[in-house]
Amino acid sequence: AARLPYSIAKTSLHDEWAPFKGSSGQVMLGSLDTVFMAAYAAAMPCMGAIADRTNQPAFLSLALFLIGFMLAGIAMAKAWSIHSYAYFLALTFLGGAAQSIAYPCVIAIISKWCGQSNIGLILGAWSSCTPI
């Protein structure tokens, strides 16, 4: 869900904000998407292992705070007049890694609520809701 405000903001970034203005702006925004998904995929196994060994609600709370921090940092780039592509890359990478915390924690929490006997039904319902 936190990816949606970012994708909406990309149009504004491309039209109004350096370094994304100009002919290479679309490529730079696309590379941010790649960095986000690469960080998400690379961090998921590590975050799953950590989530299995920690307090999942607290770890999920940390993830939500970090995701909010990343989005606020991107939003504040205009107010702070930040035009550095490295700034956007770093925040996007951190946001992808932080979002990889959510899925393992949520699955662990839901499986505790519903029990192991219904885990297939719960995971199926959870996964089918993703595109909605």
Image (cartoon, grey):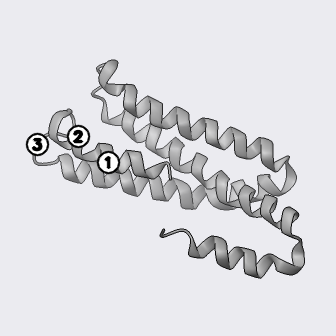
Contact between marks 2 and 1 (CB within 8 A): the answer is yes
Could you tell me residue 129's position as x and y percent? Answer: 56, 70
Checking the image for residue 22, the label placed there is: 3
Checking the image for residue 12, the label placed there is: 2
Residue 41 picture quarter: bottom right
Mark pair 2, 3: CA separation: 13 Å
Could you tell me residue 52's position as x and y percent? Answer: 83, 57
Tell whether 62 sits left or right of 16: right
Name the residue: 70% across, 54% down: 47
* Mark nearer the viewer, 2 or 3: 2
Number of numbered discs overlaid on the protein picture: 3
**Labels 1 and 3: the sequence-earlier one:** 1
Helix, strand or loop status at disc 2: helix
Residue count near mark 2 (Cα–Cα under 10 Å), binned few <14, some 14–19, many ≥20? few
Checking the image for residue 8, the label placed there is: 1
Mark pair 2, 1: CA separation: 8 Å
Q: Residue furthest left?
A: 23
Residue count near mark 3 (Cα–Cα under 10 Å), binned few <14, some 14–19, many ≥20? few
Q: Amino acid at mark 3?
A: Gly
Helix, strand or loop status at disc 3: loop
- The answer to which of 132 and 25 lies nearer the viewer is 132
Q: Amino acid at mark 1?
A: Ile
Q: Amino acid at mark 2?
A: Ser
Could you tell me residue 116's position as x and y percent? Answer: 88, 75
Tell whether 102 sits left or right of 28: right
Residue 120 picture quarter: bottom right
Tell whether 84 sits left or right of 106: left
**Labels 2 and 3: the sequence-earlier one:** 2
- The answer to which of 22 and 55 lies nearer the viewer is 55
Mark pair 1, 3: CA separation: 18 Å
Name the residue: 70% across, 75% down: 123
